[in-house]
Amino acid sequence: MAFTLTTTFVTLLITTTFIRIWLGLRHVAHVQNHRGQVPTAFNGNISLEAHQKAADYTSDKTKLVIIEASAQALLLALLTLGGGLQWIDDIWRNVLPNHEIMRGALVICSAMVVSGLIDLPFEYYKTFVVDEQFGFNKMTRSMFFSDLVKQSLVGIALGAPILFAALWLMQGAGQYWWLYLWLVWSVFNLVMLAVYPTFIAPLFNKFSPLQDEALKLRIEALLTKCGFKSQGLFVMDGSSRSSHGNAYFTGFGSSKRVVFFDTLLDRLNADEIEAVLAHELGHFKHHHVIKRIALLFFVSFVGLALLGWLINQPWFYSGLGVTQISNYMALILFLLVSPVFLFLLRPIMASYSRKNEFEADDYAAKHANAKHLVEALVKLYRDNASTLTPDPLHSAFYDSHPPASIRISKLAAYTAV
């Protein structure tokens, strides 16, 4: 069984990495091949210069993703079959030979730090080279590293209790430890949905109440018509870090709030803002957030049940390059290799997400003006340098939103009525 797992893992790791690289190269080639002409649906709204900027921005980001995918695959191979995890475990076993829970937490944290250090240069390059080159980055280097420190501290503050709870349950809660952990994990996620908007998000951005009274009254009327109750309407200083624009709902239950990037309010008029908000309300009315939470809970339930079985299988450890069997090693192995085994499910999840976007667009067209949503989307595509000509296969595999031309054509049907 160990040999079978090793063979399967190596095959899938090579296959998924090859697919990621191949799809990325296809995407770059397709975008560049269509760089010279603006799609007909966008003639008069997006200039050739803006279209070419989007093509080059998309290509540069995708090339970086290709390199990152290769680095991540190499790191995963080194941590598992290369003996990296076992080496980290051996170090902490010498330091804490009699404290398994603490040792386990340190092994898992060490592995996460190593993974984070590999990802850090790519994030830095994207921010200060790619985004900087195309005029999107507003962050200073001190802000970048300040955010990194904050994210690390928040991660420790929130992650440490759940990690120790997991290791404690794995050690002393009997054969159904995974079920108890699933309950703890589910409650934790629900609590996070409630507390994130009020206590965590403000650590990274400033949120202020929407001041435009006319726009506020208009939005509140739309919220009332759609049966949405929120804690308030807020503007986020997205411009302090990036010139990209967005709007979203956040929170859960009574803590729900509507958030607009200041960059979005600067670019769109009141009609367009109302249409964008109507799209977001479509997600709410179709219960997309609740459905995704339910799906997350289901997947975590199945995953933890599977881990509850694998933890007692010696071949699970030896097949992935680990010689010392332990609860914490089972957990970190499972976390590291699961994405490889689940990678080929990405198109299904992307398709489901695009279906949700179409449903939200449909709702927006019925409760606002489809023409205004089209105008807003065109501005966002242009100002965010989103490619209008993605490779169809790459888009089907990855994209959570429909391609621009398809999305606009469906909305145009409403404007023609």
Image (tube, rainbow, N blue to C red):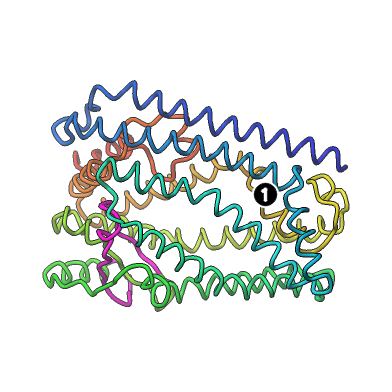
In the depicted structure, whether residue 363 falls above or below residue 350: below
In the depicted structure, whether residue 188 falls above or below residue 398: below
Label 1 is placed on what type of residue? Answer: Ser
Label 1: few (<14), some (14–19) or many (≥20) C-alpha neighbours in 10 Å: few
In the depicted structure, whether residue 199 falls above or below residue 353: below
Q: Position of residue 231 (x, y in %)?
A: 32, 77
Q: How many marks?
A: 1
Of 186 and 100, the residue lying toward us: 100
- The structure residue drawn at horizontal position 26% and vertical position 64%, both measured from the top left corner, is 237
- The structure residue drawn at horizontal position 31% and vertical position 55%, both measured from the top left corner, is 279
Q: Position of residue 323 (x, y in %)?
A: 85, 52
SS under mark 1: helix
Name the side, left or right, on which 82 lies relative to 382: right
In the depicted structure, whether residue 217 falls above or below residue 64: below
Q: Quadrant of residue 39?
A: top left
User: Which quarter shows the C terminus?
Assistant: top left
Task: Residue under label 1, please give it.
Answer: 338
Name the side, left or right, on which 376 lies relative to 388: left
User: Which quarter shows the N terminus?
Assistant: top right
Residue furthest out toward the left: 214
The region drawn magenta spans: 226-250
Q: Position of residue 413 (x, y in %)?
A: 25, 38
Find out whether residue 301 is within the magenta segment.
Answer: no
Q: Quadrant of residue 212?
A: bottom left
Of 362 and 157, the residue lying toward us: 157
- The structure residue drawn at horizontal position 18% and vertical position 45%, both measured from the top left corner, is 375
Q: Position of residue 5 (x, y in %)?
A: 80, 41
